[in-house]
């Protein structure tokens, strides 16, 4: 890593920290304003803390944006992974902004404490019985002399429970297009690398950005596609799946778009070294013997060398080399390749290690020859995490995939079969499901049910079902509309 790249990483981490501190201070100030007037000592103290964080974050910017998208908060374009703990007032702000139709704030560089006081107290006291709170609150702010805080309207997303069949079809079609285009680009890139030709970097970067866009909008739809394990061209699908899992994990860590792009690029090529191994080893139907494993253990080194040979040296290729080389090195420095002496393992490699292991074990292809159910894989990875995985990253990954992993078939207590389609982070035991069969057999029209919704309180998951026992092709339900 060059000095300039190292400096970039320091700046990025500093921006993440400042964004988190800014939003935390904003929530605390908002909560305090519900309890105290603007001349209260406690309120004044928190207001001072907010302005301190605001000025640190703003630096040379002319304005700072705080916005909420699908109950996720951003400071400018920086996603901030705020734990929804109402001790700092997060839930209260989410609910109040929803009532007022607020999606965000643009805070100008001329804002002063008096203007912030007016806004923050109006946030809780403003009422509009006629039903147009957003517009009227904006007018009230202007009339009150607040000209350095502008309101952003709440983005309207279709309620998933009220989606029409056509809306779902269009969203799922867009997701499938991104997914299969990614597989095609990986195939093209690995084919070029196998002949020591240049990898199509521009197309690869475009598809990574498409994956980032999709994950930002609706991560569950891509993760559901990644749950399918019987694609004919497993190697290319595996690289795509690992990219999806890795970028989603990076997004939940609060990585910026530039970092997510580098992580996704590296994840796509984490196993590029395998193209230099004999094909009959990769496709061997039997378990590996000692000689097979000795060959397989070469692929991280081969991967770093292949990236160096087929990509121009820049930040993307440098991180791709690090991930290819390090993604099988464990936190306790077991694994492979062996390092001459212990040193910190790259964050991206630690992320990819989790994504790679989860997808490989649930697929039952290269390292093991029988797929393990996703819930069992998660238990296995959690058991091993202190030695083999980053414990903090592993816990975030479980929250993303869910204790009932997306794409898993489950039995409900009304004897219906359903596929897990989306996790509910605040209610991991009650995800969203798609009911595909009931006592009368397979349903002609699937039903989407959010188990976290109070109206579905009588429905519960009984257990996970192995679709093979019922001769069910899960890909047919996931890929079809």
Image (cartoon, rainbow, N blue to C red):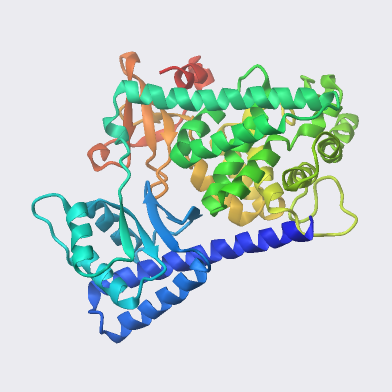
Image: 333 above or below 473: below
Which quadrant of the structure image shows residue 410? top left
Q: Position of residue 379 (x, y in %)?
A: 58, 44
Q: Judge from the rendering whether residue 264 lies leftward or rightward of residue 118; answer left or right.
A: right
In the picture, measured across the screen, residue 142 lies left or right of residue 289, that is left
Report the residue at 40% width, 23% height from top. 170
The residue that appears at 69% across and 27% down in the rendered structure is 186
Residue 228 seen in render: no
Query: Where residue 138 appears, x then y in whole percent?
Result: 23, 58
Relative horizontal placement of residue 205, taking residue 134 as reference (left or right): right
Can you give x and y, in whole percent of width and height, for residue 40 in the image?
A: 26, 84
Q: Residue at x 73, y 35 (%)?
A: 269
Q: Is residue 210 above or below residue 21?
A: above
On screen, residue 286 versus residue 100, left or right, reads right
Nearest to the observer: residue 453 or residue 194 = 194
Q: In the rendered image, which quarter contains the N terminus?
A: bottom right
- The front one of 438 and 48 is 48
Using the image as rendered, state which of residue 301 and residue 65 is in the foreground.
Answer: 65
- Residue 263 lies, in percent from the top left, at 65, 45
Task: Count how many numbered circles sit on residues in the image.
Answer: 0
Q: Quadrant of residue 192?
A: top right
Q: From this view, report whether residue 287 is shown above or below residue 46.
A: above
Q: Give the residue at x 33% y 44%.
A: 155
Considering the image in quadrants, where does the C terminus appear?
top left
**Residue 102 visible in the displayed image:** yes
């Amino acid at each position: 890593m060059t000095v300039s790249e190292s400096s970039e990483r320091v700046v990025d981490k500093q921006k993440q920290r400042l964004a988190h501190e800014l939003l935390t201070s904003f929530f605390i100030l908002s909560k305090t304003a519900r309890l105290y007037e603007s001349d209260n000592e406690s309120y004044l103290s928190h207001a001072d803390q907010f302005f301190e964080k605001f000025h640190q974050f703003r630096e040379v910017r002319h304005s700072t944006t705080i916005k909420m998208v699908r109950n996720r908060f951003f400071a400018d374009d920086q996603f901030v992974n705020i734990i929804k703990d109402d001790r700092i007032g997060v839930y209260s702000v989410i609910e109040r902004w929803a009532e007022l139709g607020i999606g965000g704030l643009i805070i100008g560089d001329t804002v002063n404490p008096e203007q912030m006081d007016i806004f923050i107290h109006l946030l809780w006291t403003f009422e509009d019985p006629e039903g147009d709170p957003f517009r009227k609150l904006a007018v009230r702010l202007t009339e009150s002399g607040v000209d350095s805080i502008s309101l952003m309207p709440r983005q309207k997303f279709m309620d998933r429970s009220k989606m029409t069949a056509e809306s779902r079809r269009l969203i799922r079609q867009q997701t499938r297009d991104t997914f299969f285009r990614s597989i095609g680009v990986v195939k093209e890139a690995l084919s070029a690398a196998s002949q020591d030709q240049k990898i199509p970097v521009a197309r690869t970067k475009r598809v990574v950005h498409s994956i980032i866009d999709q994950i930002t909008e609706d991560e569950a739809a891509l993760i559901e596609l990644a749950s399918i394990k019987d694609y004919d061209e497993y190697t290319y699908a595996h690289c795509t799946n690992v990219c999806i899992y890795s970028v989603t994990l990076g997004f939940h860590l609060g990585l910026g778009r530039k970092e997510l792009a580098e992580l996704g690029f590296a994840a796509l090529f984490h196993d590029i070294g395998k193209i230099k191994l004999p094909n009959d080893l990769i496709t061997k139907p039997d378990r590996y013997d000692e000689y097979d494993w000795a060959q397989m253990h070469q692929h991280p080194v081969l991967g770093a060398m292949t990236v160096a040979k087929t990509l121009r040296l820049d930040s993307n290729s440098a991180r791709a080399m690090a991930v290819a080389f390090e993604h099988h090195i464990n936190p306790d420095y077991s694994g492979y390749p062996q390092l001459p002496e212990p040193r910190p393992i790259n964050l991206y490699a630690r992320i990819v290690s989790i994504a790679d292991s989860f997808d490989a074990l649930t697929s039952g292809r290269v390292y093991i020859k029988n797929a393990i159910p996703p819930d069992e894989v998660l238990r296995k990875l959690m058991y091993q995490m202190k030695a083999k995985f980053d414990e903090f990253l592993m816990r975030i990954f479980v929250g993303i995939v869910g204790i009932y992993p997306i794409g898993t078939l489950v039995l409900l207590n009304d004897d219906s079969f359903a596929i897990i389609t989306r996790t509910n982070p605040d209610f991991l035991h009650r995800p969203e499901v798609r009911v595909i069969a009931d006592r009368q057999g397979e349903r002609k029209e699937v039903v989407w049910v959010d188990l976290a919704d109070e109206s579905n309180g009588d429905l519960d998951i009984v257990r996970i079902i192995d679709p093979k026992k019922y001769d069910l092709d899960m890909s047919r339900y996931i890929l079809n509309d």
